[in-house]
Image (cartoon, grey):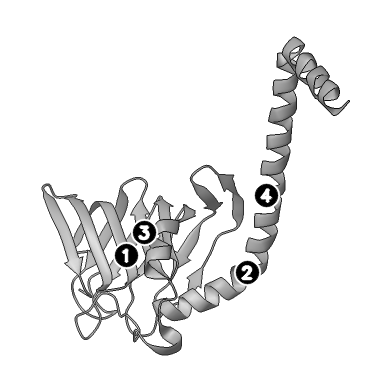
Amino acid sequence: MGVRIWLLRCSWRLRHPARSTLVVVAVLLACWLAVDLALGRMYRTLRPSLEEEYGRALGRPLTLGSYRGLRWSGLDVGPSRILSNGVDLTQLAADGLVVSVDLWASLHQRRWVVHLHVQGLEADWRRNAQGAVWTVPPAQGEGAMPVELWVHTRNPAQFRLWWQPGADGPPSPDLTGAFVGRMALGHRQHDLVIKGQLDLASGGRLSVGSRGVP
């Protein structure tokens, strides 16, 4: 009897392929929407603690944008900012983020390896009184970066550098350009890694590579 019912169902599906396809598509769409809603609720709940934890690890205030939906490439998040702190005035702002997790690398390192693909990034780099543009907190204890975070530019990032240390430097940046590449925060060997190309507004191109804090 069970075999007969199964054969009847297969026969019906063969006679109505379009209707069967629509049912499958509707089920997949419903599942996608359910996962999207669940992730949205989870993100809104976790956002304050994420801002606090990662802001402490970065050593500066962090504001994350609102949840904009689940994409094939990851979670889409709205405009976000990394603000300056009391040590240096460097800050970054982005129009949007797409967040994904590298599961293979996470298993290999036994901690999360997260990728942020950044849209419309604007980076203002300012040297502090000690000559550093980015002050990294100690790698141990509560301030340690809980993940290895890779930041990728989805389109050219606007780059501005004020070379004169302190807040009383010139109002116009000493160097401007567009950067395409990636940067790792909390790297397991070098803490900070930068690699990419910088097209200068004044003309010319620079290859940027740094392993450690500039």
Q: Upstream in the sequence, badge 3 or badge 4?
A: 4
- The outermost residue toward the bottom is 141
For residue 46, which numbered disc appears in the image?
2
Query: Residue 191 in the image: x percent, y percent?
Result: 29, 74
Residue at image position (51%, 56%) is 79
Q: Which mark is residue 197?
A: none
Where residue 100 appears, x then y in whole percent? 47, 54
Q: Earlier in the sequence, mark 3 or mark 2?
A: 2
User: What residue type is disc 1 on?
Assistant: Ala
* Direction from residue 33 to residue 129 in the image, left or right: left
The answer to the question of whether label 3 and label 1 lie on touching residues, with beta carbons closer than 8 A, is: yes
N-term-proximal mark, 4 vs 1: 4
Label 4 or label 2, whichever comes before in sequence order: 4
Dot 3 or dot 1: first in sequence order is 3
Packing grade of label 1 (10 A; few <14, some 14-19, many >=20) is many
> What residue is pinned by disc 1?
184
Amino acid identity at mark 4: Val
Q: Residue at x 24, y 63 (%)?
A: 194
Q: Write down the quadrant of residue 144 in the picture.
A: bottom left
Q: Give neighbour class at mark 3: few <14, some 14-19, many 20+ (Cα, 10 Å).
A: some
Residue assigned mark 4: 35
Spot occupied by residue 94 in the image (x, y as percentages of width and height):
43, 56
Can I make out residue 102 in this image?
no
Mark 3 belongs to which amino acid? Val
